[in-house]
Image (cartoon, rainbow, N blue to C red):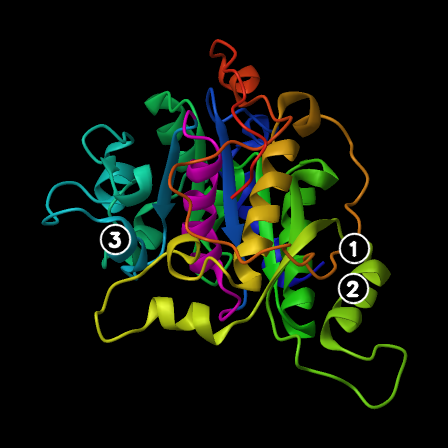
Amino acid sequence: MSRFFDAIRRADESRQVAASLAPVPSGPGRTLAVVSNKGGVGKTTVATNLAVYLRAMREDLPVLVIGLDDQSTIDRMFEIGTRSGATIADALRAGSLAGAIRLGHYGVHYVPTSARIGELKRELQDPDRLRRTIASSGWRGVVIVDTKSDLEVLTQNALRASDLALVLARDLGSVTEAGKVFELLQLWGRPGNAARILLSQVDLRVKYASGEARDILALLLAEIRRLEYPLLGSFVSSSPKVEALLSNPDRVVRSVLHGAPTSLVHRQLRHLAEELLEILRPDAVDSAEPAAAAPGPAPADPAPAREPDAPRRPLAVDVSAWLGLPPVPQVGAESI
């Protein structure tokens, strides 16, 4: 075991937190952590757009986005009006999200980011601060936690709070780094399916002239199978059109759903949201499910997609069952 994990083990033992290492539900809802120890894999893009898709597909499902990075992308996508009030750094110091949660664009709630959140790395000694902070809020929905490209204390807090961690990878280097997340969760006694790899920012134009793998997707799938890591059935490819939604002359961040509804990435994110809603049902979360089928190209739509006039709900997913809410009748068979 690496010195990194030896240090974590010694720190845990010195704080005598062995009793808290067992997985504890984060609250009435479900918490997703989006993590990678390697940058450039699209963590914030996935976290923010997944929030938008979940809300569009289930308008009765509250979605909250929390960013543990010092970048302001979350605020630029969801902020309405002038920014003021408590940030995520303030909330973690206080151990409460009261007064920090805001309603943003697309019906998504978020906690404002903090440019000085890095200071908490020196202040926080408790790896369960975020879990308890979320639990005390009583949030009845999905919480999506975006993280920095490291495995330091804030990212550890996100992993400890999560019901499911999405470990993003786009190349062989990030697949190797993903192993550190699985090793850390194993050290904490978490089940093997508490994290799954999501292939993200995959450049489908990359081809190889020799070898068994003829393209980057086949290469990554072969490596993940060799390492026996759990894998989501969905994946997200890279796209210049999506990059333009993040960096443009207007200096605003637009969602894929509203800015690129005819793109391949739109269909991939829709499939990802559907898959996660199914996984996060209580009878699915607590079961030892086999690894998902290998991802493949999203099927072509029979007609160009368009921006929906109203939010839709996915078929055969009873979100109310795991929120403790009265059953909500499904409407329509049309998907976004």
Task: Tell me the distance, in whole angstroms, between the alpha carbons under discs 3 and 1.
Answer: 34 Å
Q: Amino acid at mark 1?
A: Ala
| Residue at mark 2 | 221
Of 264 and 196, which appears nearest the observer?
Answer: 264
Which span of residues is magenta-colored?
39-60
Give residue 95's position: percent from left, percent from top. 29, 31
Does the CB distance between marks 1 and 2 fall below 8 Å? yes
Give the residue furthest to the right. Answer: 212
Instruction: Specify which label sits upstream in the sequence, 2 or 3.
Output: 3
Give residue 297's position: percent from left, percent from top. 71, 62
Instruction: Specify which label sits upstream in the sequence, 3 or 1.
Output: 3
- Determine whether 282 is above or below 228 in the image: above
Q: Which mark is residue 129?
A: none
Mark 1: few/some/many CA within 10 Å (<14, 14-19, 20+): some
Give the main secondary structure, helix, strand or loop, of the magenta stretch: helix
Give residue 322's position: percent from left, percent from top. 55, 19
Element carrying mark 1: loop
Q: Nearer the viewer, mark 1 or mark 2?
A: 1
| Residue at mark 3 | 75
| Residue at mark 1 | 294
